[in-house]
Image (cartoon, grey):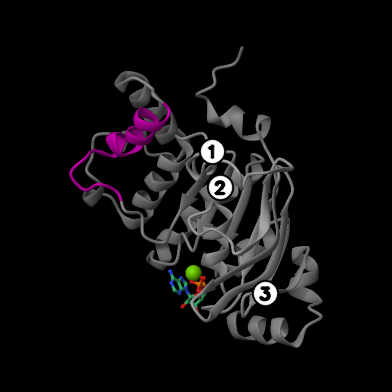
Amino acid sequence: MSDPTNSRDAVSRDAVSLTGTGLHLSFGKNHVLRGVDIQVDAGTTTTVIGPSGSGKSTLLRVLNRLHEPDQGDILLDGRSVLADNPDELRRRIGMVFQHFNLFPHKTVAQNIALGPQKLRSLSKDEAHEVALRQLDIVGLRNKADARPGNLSGGQQQRVAIARALAMEPQVMFFDEATSALDPELVKGVLALITELSEKGMTMVVVTHEMGYARNVSDHVLFMDHGAVVETGAPEQIFTDASSERLRNFLSQVL
Ligand code: ADP
Ligand code: MG
C-alpha cells in the first residue's frame, strides 16, 4: 500500500467533487447568498470572481459550514454532508485565507505539525515528518526551524498552504490568498496554487488574479449581489461574457 501521508499522490487519488445547490444565507436583513449553485467536478479548479461584497467569502464559509446555510444542500463526492458533524467536513476541506495566522512563537514545522497531531492523532514525530514533507512540496524545507516572523509574506503564505495540506484535505479553498502580498511575492504563491490545480486537487479559488482565473482554472463563476450571474469556461467568461454586469466588472479589473 502507498503511504497515506504522501499527499503528492493523495491529491489525485482521493479527488472528490463538491456541489452546492440553492444556497441561501442571510445575516439579519442582509440576504447575502440568494440561491447559489456551484458544481466543482473532482480534480478541477473553479475560480470565483466578482466585486467586493458580492458574497464570495460567504460562499466559501457556507460550503465548509462555518456558516450553516438557511436553505440548500452541500454535497461532497455526491453525498449530502449537512447531517454530518461540521468538524468532519472542515477536516476534509483545507482553507487558506488572505491573512495566514501562523503562531509567531512556534517554528514553521511546529505550525504545520500542530493540526495533524491534534486532529489526525499522529505522534509528534509522525506529525513532524508530515510537516517536513509538506515543506518540501512548497519549497521551504530549509525554513523548518525558522519563526514565521523571519519569513517573507509569500513564504508565510506557502507555510499556511503547507499547513492546510498537512491535514490531507480532499478539497482546497483559497480566499484571496495573494491579496495581502507585495506584488513581487504574488507569483511564487500563485505558482504553488497552480501546481496544486495541475496535480488534480479539487479547488475553489476566490481571486482578483484574472490571469490565474483565465489560464489555470477549469471553470469560472462570476458573482454579484449574492447570486451567480454567469458561469462557464474561462475562455467564454473572459472573451464572450453575455451579461452586462460581467462585462462591466471585467472592464474594471482587466
Ligand atoms: P466578498 O467576499 O465577495 O467581498 P462577503 O462574502 O465578505 O463578500 O460579504 C458579502 C456580504 O455579507 C456583505 O454585505 C457583508 O457585509 C456581509 N457579511 C459577511 N460576513 C458577515 C457576517 N459575519 N455578519 C454579517 N454580515 C456579513
Ligand atoms: Mg471576500
Q: Is 48 on the left or on the right of 61, as rendered? A: right
Can you tell me whether the CB of the residue at mark 2 lies under 8 Å from the nearest atom of ligand 2? no
**Magenta stretch, main secondary structure class:** helix
Earlier in the chain: of badge 3 and badge 1, it is: 1
Residue 227 numbered mark, or none: 3
> In which quadrant of the rendered image does the C terminus lie?
bottom right
Rendered location of residue 153, percent (x, y): 33, 57
Foreground: disc 3 or disc 2: 3
Q: Residue furthest left?
A: 105
In the image, residue 211 lies at what x, y percent?
Answer: 62, 66
Q: Residue at position x 68%, y 72% from top?
A: 222
| Comes first in the chain, label 3 or label 2 | 2
Residue at label 2? 172
The reply to whether discs 1 and 2 touch (Cβ–Cβ < 8 Å) is: yes
Residue 216 can be seen, yes or no: no
| Residue annotated with mark 1 | 169
* Residue lying at 37% horizontally and 20% vertically, measured from the top left: 126
- Tell me where residue 142 appears, x and y as whole percent: 32, 34
The answer to whether marks 3 and 1 mark residues whose Cβ atoms lie closer than 8 Å is no
Q: Where 167 sits versus 22, above or below?
A: above
Residue, x 61% and y 80% (percent of image)? 225
Q: Is residue 148 visible?
A: yes
Q: Residue at x 41, y 63 (%)?
A: 184
Q: Is residue 229 left or right of residue 173?
A: right
Amino acid type, mark 2: Met
Q: Nearer the viewer, residue 191 or 28?
A: 28
Disc 2 residue crowd, few under 14, some 14–19, many 20+, Cα 10 Å = many
Disc 3 on helix, strand or loop? strand
Mark 3 or 1: in front is 3
- Point out the stretch of residues depicted in magenta: 102-120
